[in-house]
Amino acid sequence: MKIEFWMVGKTSFPYLNEGVPIYEKRITRYIPFQSQVIPDIKNAKNMPAAQLKEKEGQAILDKLNKEDFLILLDEKGKSFSSVAFAQQLDQYLLRSNKRLIFLIGGAFGFSEAVYARANQKISLSKMTFSHQMIRLFFVEQLYRAFSILRKEPYHNE
Amino acid sequence: MKIEFWMVGKTSFPYLNEGVPIYEKRITRYIPFQSQVIPDIKNAKNMPAAQLKEKEGQAILDKLNKEDFLILLDEKGKSFSSVAFAQQLDQYLLRSNKRLIFLIGGAFGFSEAVYARANQKISLSKMTFSHQMIRLFFVEQLYRAFSILRKEPYHNE
């Protein structure tokens, strides 16, 4: 089992490029883990939102294998407490040898084709956060989930 | 009306010291805003959690005026969508000239005395996040709330 974390578009905030790897590195203590940025679509600024979502969606689908288990981080997804999320993660890890892919979309969200392909949708909060900041929230939460499963103290450092 | 943002204890993560001020600065475009760190209690490491919470609580209460409207950012609080949070904020701002204080506690949360003094409790997520990272989530969300109230586009930069 391997966890991958995909996100659409480079982040323009240096503090996120600093913060996210702190937790990514911690996660690799527990499981093979890799993150990748799906490159920004060219000429995105001159493109209607619907078309941009479509193109981003195609780029995502092109990268997926049939067996991948795809989880969208999506406002419309199911919300969990941290402990419930850890238990859900444990279930995924037990039941399959597939790649487990967590995906954060671009500024306009996911295309219909990506929704149709997804195996699960998870929401981190009822609130809307920037799709860039959510990267940080997610890696901290994934790290926390492993620390919960291993019964390790993670004292809100 | 003035908004203050209080948090217990210095952050040890440089990326947070970089990220939080980005949004704080944006908030000051809309309203007088000030953040302050309530200093760590001395010898905290050798103190039982309950005693530490008590001492932190006392330091908080000492800083409050009777008229302050105190909102705890607390897992047990009410959760809002970003739009609902903006509307709630609008209500607060309309109805009073008091200081509106948002407070993030220390690693062990709030003392009973602080809970008793609070006017409102708000939860940013069902998930537990580190009490340091939540600072970043909150300032982004407060900035987003003003951009919603002013009907300004805030395109998940």
Image: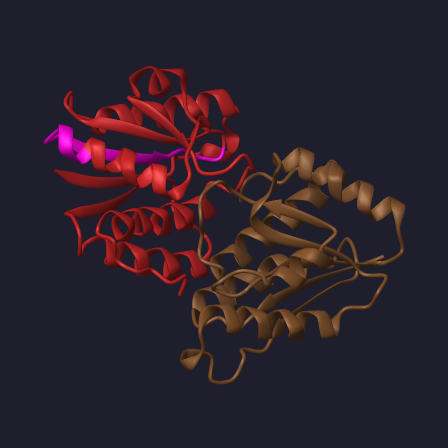
Chain colours: A brown, B red
With respect to residue B120, does A19 lie above or below?
below
With respect to residue A69, does A87 lie above or below?
above
With respect to residue A113, does A12 lie above or below?
below
Instruction: Specify the quadrant that holds the C terminus of chain B.
Output: bottom left
Instruction: Specify the quadrant that holds the N terminus of chain B.
Output: top left
Q: Is residue A40 left or right of residue B86?
A: right
Image location of residue A95, percent across then percent down = 88, 46
Q: Is residue B97 left or right of residue A62?
A: left
Q: Residue A90: in sight, yes or no?
A: yes
The residue under the point 36% across, 52% down is B140
The residue under the point 38% across, 38% down is B40
Q: Which of the two residues, A115 or B79, is positioned nearer the viewer here?
A: A115
Q: Residue B38: in sight, yes or no?
A: no
Q: Quadrant of residue B156?
A: bottom left
The residue under the point 66% across, 63% down is A113
Is A108 magenta? The answer is no
Image location of residue B24, percent across then percent down = 27, 54
Q: How many marks?
A: 0
Image location of residue A122, percent across then percent down = 63, 46
Image location of residue B51, percent across then percent down = 45, 21
Q: Quadrant of residue A99?
A: bottom right
Q: Is residue B100 left or right of residue B58?
A: left
Q: Which of the two residues, B91 or A151, is positioned nearer the viewer here?
A: B91
The residue under the point 28% across, 33% down is B88
Q: Is residue A42 left or right of residue A153?
A: left
Query: Can you name the residue that lies furthest to the bottom here?
Result: A43
Region in magenta: B93-107
